[in-house]
Amino acid sequence: MTARVAVVGGGLAGITAALRCADAGYAVRLFESRPWLGGLTHSFPRGALWIDNGQHVFLRCCDRYLALLDRLGMREAVRLQPRLDIPVSGAGRVGRLRRLPLPAPLHLSWALLRYPWLSPGARVRFVRAALALRAVDTTDPRTDATSFGDWLRAHGQDRDAVDSLWDLVGIATLNARADDVSLALAATVFQIGLLTDSDAADIGWSRIPLRQLHGDAAQAALTAAGATVSHEKVTAVRRSEAGWSVHTGDSEFAADAVVSAVPPPAAQALLPPDAVDLPANWAAALGSSPIVNIHVVYDRPVMDEPLRAGVGTVVQWVFDRTDASGLRTEAGPRGAAATDGPGAAGAAGPLPAGAQYLAVSVSAADAFVDRPVADLRREFLPALEQLLPAARTAQVTDFFVTRERHATFRPAPGSARLRPPAATALPGPTLAGAWTDTGWPATMEGAVRSGEAAAAEVISHLAGLRPRAGAAERTGTPEPRTRISEVIR
């Protein structure tokens, strides 16, 4: 009899795990409570636009995420910079972080020499700190317990250097400021992204709405692989005589293995309390951090680059979403339903020819997430005009805000002890999600890696290659494990 696998949660982690298990020949059913797949990477229609719930980017070093795009047949739907190039503006100055075709870390030497927010002495201190960061042991528990901000100050980094460079990268990737971040996670980001391979930090983004890139493509790929997608809310995962039962409001699904790919509070509520060897309040202690996106449509082009970063301004990053949104002059996006997502009600109508749609991404957005739209409009429109002078004479035809209150886990010092591995203490259930112990921050890459790790645990368990022992040391490597290890390389 073919083994049955239930995957709870249809974000990138759940999609990855479900595809891996289906490709391994198991009968897979993926449960997702929302009417689409993609989790926190989704889109909804608003008038003539497809709106992504937030601006999601990846780097060239995100090899597992790129592998997922290959599996979905969507690699050609993303754009990847041939060479890292970030225009930066703020406080009346303009700079550019553009890499040279040199080995890391020399690839950023010319950009640092011309970076207007650092004095000559600060540039020297920055280089010394960067070289010291290369040597940080990210696996040492003491590293995780240390604040990145404290480490930067101990290595000669002043407020200007932190604001204009370290946090420019760190806030966007870690969703927290340096003082609130574990040194282990920050060091991982900078070691992998900027200090090892010169092309690792080249930036990529979707050329189409995320709903199409991830959700629709995953639905098609899962169906082709023989998996079933059920848009039902799972209320409990319980032991049964046959293994495990997944309960929804109307039905029960018997499974030999279960992948829980939902946020921490939901995972803690769904699984038996003895599944995870963590303190009773681990999900609440791990916490979450919000991201706010400010969406502005101008009647004419005001920015001539695909992206721009800001220093000394509330506009952390701004992206040109015109093409990816499907901007057109007819009344709405092709195939869209007016009630298909948040923000559809009261949406803007047809847009003028030549309009440009910009999205401002604000990470670590605790100060903004609860503020009214009118307040955010009064603050962000003048800030955009300072950053983009052409916006001063343009007309705003639409302005709206999307908020992800629990966008990522909080990567605080000491958070590693609250991030469980894929394996649980019970035979059958596994965990997936960017919040699990992937060694990465909460990114699309981290989510995919977690799904791969959960699938490898399921495959190993169902193949009978070893007894399940949770996070304990594993022994024995029969020949089929070679194929499983290749899944998570």
Image (cartoon, rainbow, N blue to C red):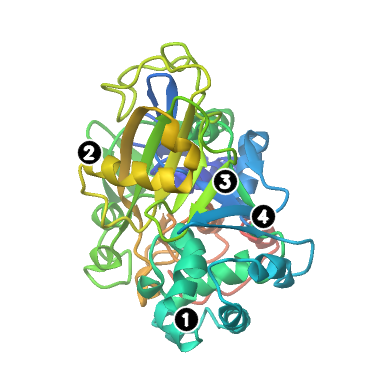
SS at mark 3? helix
Q: Residue at x 62, y 82 (%)?
A: 124
Using the numbered discs, state the Cα–Cα distance from disc 3 to disc 1 in whole angstroms: 40 Å
Dot 1 corresponds to which residue? 152
As drawn, the label of residue 480 is: none
Q: Residue at x 66, y 40 (%)?
A: 70
Q: Do the residues labelled 2 and 1 touch (CB within 8 Å)?
A: no
SS at mark 2? helix
Using the numbered discs, state the Cα–Cα distance from disc 3 to disc 4 in whole angstroms: 32 Å
Dot 4 corresponds to which residue? 84
Front residue of this view, candidates 271 and 167: 167
Using the numbered discs, state the Cα–Cα distance from disc 2 to disc 1 in whole angstroms: 37 Å
Identify residue type, mark 1. Answer: Leu
Circle 3 or circle 4, nearest the eye:
4
Q: Do the residues labelled 4 and 2 touch (CB within 8 Å)?
A: no
Q: How crowded is mark 3: few (under 14 residues within 10 Å), some or many (20 or more)?
A: many
Using the numbered discs, state the Cα–Cα distance from disc 3 to disc 2 in whole angstroms: 45 Å
Front residue of this view, candidates 254 and 235: 235
Circle 3 or circle 2, nearest the eye:
2
Q: How crowded is mark 1: few (under 14 residues within 10 Å), some or many (20 or more)?
A: many
Dot 3 corresponds to which residue? 20
